[in-house]
């Protein structure tokens, strides 16, 4: 276990982020929620670039939850417009930088332009081997599990032969290892239906910093904190550290 607060040892292989606090960030500055989401999109560009530079293999971002449809119609529309803008402006760079885009969630109800762009960019970047950027769009953890159970049963699997792995193979994250570190910005300390199955042994990091203010120095603080964690997966400390 490292104790050097400045070291970047023990980097997580997979970071998942609940990007929260755009609205409150904007409100505190006398700006509109829309401006908060715009600033949030800038933070996304920054953190994707930094994770790629650090060699993080998987970055999963919670873009839109299945519960976020309950927001005002205009805000929902703006969020998907921003997603489209992000995909249009970043796809070429993603291709160049070897970043593969993946989508977690049922995007059939996502507005057509954003849905089409998601599919196109996934296809265009599919060979990217340096980092996987997974965007959770219309994602809900409980719905994902129900969906996986249904698909598993449709394969004709004998209920008694269902395993944790066979169920996981039907989740949206089937090709992605479980997150090592989950970061939630914006003060709240809850999962809000994010990666419920996958976060069984994920290290949790909550910060009051709202998402639009979350920069490379905040990421570094989260990584330094993660590096000090002792992940035991149910074993004793002695077993974990081979003492
Ligand atoms: C996160 O910021 C963006 C999404 C959930 C899409 P919020 O919009 O939830 O910001 P707050 O929580 O209202 O501050
Ligand atoms: C979680 O944030 C969803 C995303 C960041 C996309 P919310 O703002 O929707 O979460 P709650 O409602 O505060 O739990
Ligand atoms: Mg919020």
Image (tube, rainbow, N blue to C red):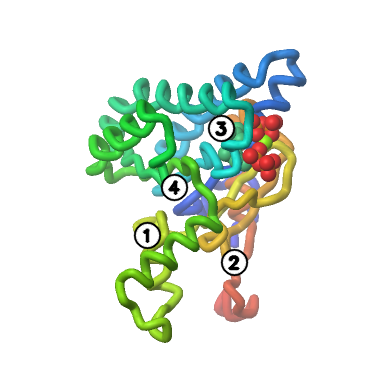
Residues under numbered marks 3 and 2 in contact, where contact means CB atoms less than 8 Å apart: no
Quarter containing ligand 2?
top right
Q: Position of residue 9 (x, y in %)?
A: 52, 52
Q: For this rendering, which residue is in front, 168 or 156?
A: 156
**Mark on residue 84?**
none
Quadrant of the image for the C terminus?
bottom right
Instruction: Describe the element under mark 4 as helix, strand or loop.
Output: loop
Q: Disc 3 and disc 2: Cα gap in Å?
A: 24 Å
Circle nearer the viewer, 2 or 4 = 4
| Res 200 → quadrant | bottom right
For the residue with label 4, is its CB less than 8 Å from the closest atom of ligand 2? no
Q: Badge 3: few (under 14), some or many (20 or more) residues near its Cα, within 10 Å? A: some
Residues under numbered marks 2 and 4 in contact, where contact means CB atoms less than 8 Å apart: no
| Res 18 → quadrant | top right
**Mark on residue 174?**
1
Residues under numbered marks 1 and 2 in contact, where contact means CB atoms less than 8 Å apart: no
Identify the mark nearer the N-term, 1 or 3: 1
Q: Name the residue that disc number 2 marks.
A: 231
From the viewer's perspective, is residue 103 above or below residue 38?
A: below
Q: Where is residue 20 in the image (x, y as percent from the top left)?
A: 64, 36
Identify the mark nearer the N-term, 2 or 4: 4
Circle nearer the viewer, 4 or 3 = 4
Instruction: Describe the element under mark 3 as helix, strand or loop.
Output: helix
The residue at the far top in this view is 30
For the point 47% across and 40% down, the residue is 137
Q: Name the residue that disc number 3 marks.
A: 216
Q: For this rendering, which residue is in front, 104 or 53?
A: 104
For the point 40% across and 38% down, the residue is 52
Q: Name the residue that disc number 4 marks.
A: 105
């Amino acid at each position: 276990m490292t104790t050097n607060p400045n070291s970047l040892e023990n980097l997580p292989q997979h970071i998942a982020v609940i990007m929260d606090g755009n609205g409150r960030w904007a409100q505190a500055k006398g700006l509109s929620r829309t401006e908060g989401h715009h600033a949030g999109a800038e933070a996304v560009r920054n953190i994707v670039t930094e994770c790629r530079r650090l060699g993080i293999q998987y970055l999963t971002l919670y873009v839109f939850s299945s519960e976020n449809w309950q927001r005002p119609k205009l805000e929902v529309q703006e969020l998907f417009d921003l997603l489209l803008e992000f995909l249009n402006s970043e796809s070429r760079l993603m291709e160049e930088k070897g970043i593969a885009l993946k989508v977690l969630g049922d995007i059939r109800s996502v507005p057509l332009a954003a849905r089409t762009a998601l599919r196109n960019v996934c296809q265009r970047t599919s060979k990217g081997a340096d980092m996987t950027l997974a965007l959770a769009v219309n994602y809900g953890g409980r719905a994902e599990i129900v969906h996986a159970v249904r698909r598993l049963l449709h394969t004709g699997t004998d209920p008694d032969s269902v395993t944790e792995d066979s169920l996981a193979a039907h989740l949206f994250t089937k090709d992605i290892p479980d997150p090592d570190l989950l970061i939630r910005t914006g003060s709240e300390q809850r999962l809000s239906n994010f990666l419920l199955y996958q976060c069984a042994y994920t290290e949790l990091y909550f910060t009051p910093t709202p998402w639009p203010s979350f920069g490379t120095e905040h990421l570094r603080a989260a990584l330094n904190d993660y590096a000090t964690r002792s992940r035991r997966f149910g074993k004793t400390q002695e077993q974990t550290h081979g003492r």
